[in-house]
Image (cartoon, grey):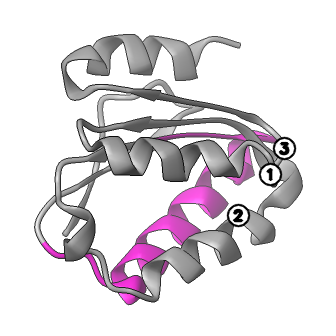
Amino acid sequence: MLQLINSLPPHVVGVHAFADVTETEYTNTLIPLFDKLLEKSKQINFILVLETKIKNFAPGMWCGNIKLGLKYFFKWKKVVLVTDQKGMLGYSDLFKYFIPGKFRSFPLDQLDEAVRWVDEK
């Protein structure tokens, strides 16, 4: 399940992932979220708080993630992944080689620092 994070600065969007996440939910949540952000901002600053196991994501979701990355290819400014899952940290690091923008990851206990980083202009 994905839940919007509402307490972010206006130029930042984010979701909190927990329990099961389907590919449809992922794209149906993020595309409108990114499109709405791009109406008022020229770039995407995104935070994903991941508190679910990788196995709880639908297998096709990772392909959907790549599609989203390409759909907004020139719009990425900052992306931050907040999780305690070591395997996910390596996965997110791959994106910095394929998609423009800055990428970082933080452990869950540093969520406030992650928000400050993605908020910096």
Determine the CA span between mark 3 and mark 2. 9 Å
Callout 2 amino acid: Gly
Residue 44 placed where, x, y %?
Answer: 68, 43
Q: In the displayed structure, would residue 18 be above or below residue 84?
A: below
Q: Are marks 1 and 3 in contact (CB under 8 Å)?
A: yes
Residue at x 41% of width, y 74% of height: 26
Pointer 3 or 2: first along the chain: 2
Specify the segment rendered in magenta: 20-47
The quadrant the C terminus occupies is top right
Q: Of the numbered discs in the image, which one, if any, rests on residue 69?
A: 2
Q: In the displayed structure, would residue 108 be above or below residue 93?
A: above
Residue with the mark numbered 3: 100
Q: Are marks 3 and 2 in contact (CB under 8 Å)?
A: no
Q: Of the numbered discs in the image, which one, if any, rests on residue 99?
A: 1
Residue at x 42% of width, y 71% of height: 29
Depth check, front residue: 8 or 56 = 56
Depth check, front residue: 44 or 88 = 88
Side of 82 relative to 66 (left or right): left
Residue 69 placed where, x, y %?
Answer: 70, 63
Q: Is residue 114 magenta?
A: no
Q: In the displayed structure, would residue 113 be above or below residue 12?
A: above
Pointer 2 or 1: first along the chain: 2
Q: Are marks 2 and 1 in contact (CB under 8 Å)?
A: yes
**Main SS type for the magenta part?**
helix
